[in-house]
Image (cartoon, grey):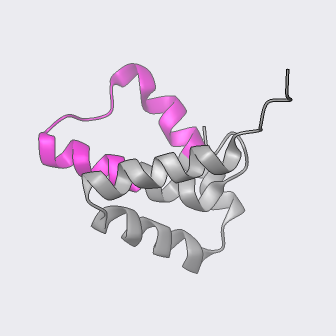
Amino acid sequence: MAMALGHAQPARRLYRTAEALRDALGTPVAPADRDRHEVILAQAQEQLDTDTFRESLVAGQRASADEAVEGALTILRAMTVPLADA
C-alpha cells in the first residue's frame, strides 16, 4: 500500500522487515505473490537513489516485529485522509 501511494522508502523498509521475519519463520513469499512482490521492489528501487535504497534495506533488516508493525501503522496514519464532518 505504501508503494502504491508513492512512499518508496517506507515501502522498501517494510518489505525488507517482512522478508527478514519470513526468513526467521521459514515462510517464503507465496508463489502467487512473487511476481507482484518483485514489481513493487523494482518500483521502489527506481524511485530511490542507491544509498537511500540500501539504507532502507538495512533499516528494514534490523527492525524488530514490533518496530515493523509500528512503522506500518505510522505510514498508514500519514496516508489516511480525514473524513469530512457529517
Residue sticking out furthest to the bottom: 51
Q: Nearer the viewer, residue 31 or 78?
A: 78
Q: Is residue 61 left or right of residue 56?
A: left
Instruction: Please report the residue visible at 51 percent of the width from the left and 41 percent of the height from the top.
Output: 38
- What main secondary structure does the magenta stretch of the protein show? helix
Expressed as whole percent of the image width and height from the top left, the position of residue 35 reads 50, 30
Q: Where is 50 relative to 6, above or below?
A: below
Q: Quadrant of the C terminus?
A: top right
Expressed as whole percent of the image width and height from the top left, the position of residue 45 reads 61, 60
Q: Is residue 78 left or right of residue 59?
A: right
Expressed as whole percent of the image width and height from the top left, the position of residue 32 reads 41, 19
Expressed as whole percent of the image width and height from the top left, the position of residue 67 reads 34, 58
**Is 37 in the magenta?**
yes
Instruction: Please report the residue visible at 38 percent of the width from the left and 48 percent of the height from the top.
Output: 69
Q: Is residue 79 left or right of residue 36?
A: right
Instruction: Please report the residue visible at 58 percent of the width from the left and 51 percent of the height from the top.
Output: 75
Q: Quadrant of the N terminus?
A: top right
The region drawn magenta spans: 16-40
**Is 86 in the magenta?**
no
